[in-house]
Image: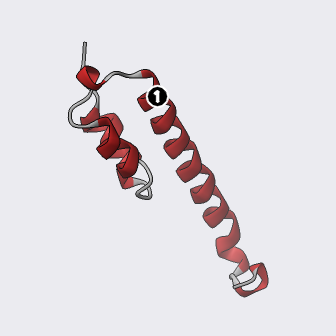
Amino acid sequence: MSSKEIDPRFRLPLALAAVVQVALTAAALLDLRKRTEDQLRGPKRLWTVASFVNFVGPIAYFTFGRRRP
């Protein structure tokens, strides 16, 4: 699918959604890198994989995955 096939009205929202998705994933992965297993709710590997699941994974990680000090 080329960019010419995408309706021009949806190009900007689609691009913004992609930027937000990449930013959320990057933020979750960077945060996971600095945390130890005991600072997480669940295995680190699980949260790393979950971070790649569209918007849901990173949001779930930031909402449920980190233990509060």
Where is residue 30? Give x, y as percent.
51, 31
Which residue is at the front of the view, 17 or 50?
50
Which residue is at the front of the view, 10 or 19?
19
Q: Residue at x 28, y 28 (%)?
A: 66
Where is residue 22? Give x, y as percent.
58, 49
Q: Is residue 3 left or right of residue 69?
A: right
How many discs appear?
1
Where is residue 68? Give x, y as percent.
24, 19
Name the residue beneath numbered marker 1.
Answer: 33
Query: What is the residue that sits farthest to the right in this orientation?
Result: 4
Residue 37 found in image quarter: top left
Q: Residue at x 45, y 37 (%)?
A: 28
Where is the C terminus found, in terms of image quarters? top left
Colour theme: secondary structure
Q: Is residue 12 left or right of residue 20?
A: right
Where is the N terminus found, in terms of image quarters? bottom right
Q: Is residue 52 left or right of residue 18?
A: left
Which residue is at the front of the view, 16 or 9?
16
- Disc 1 on helix, strand or loop? helix
Q: Residue at x 33, y 21 (%)?
A: 36
Amino acid type at image mark 1: Arg
Placement of 13 over or under 28, stated as above or below:
below
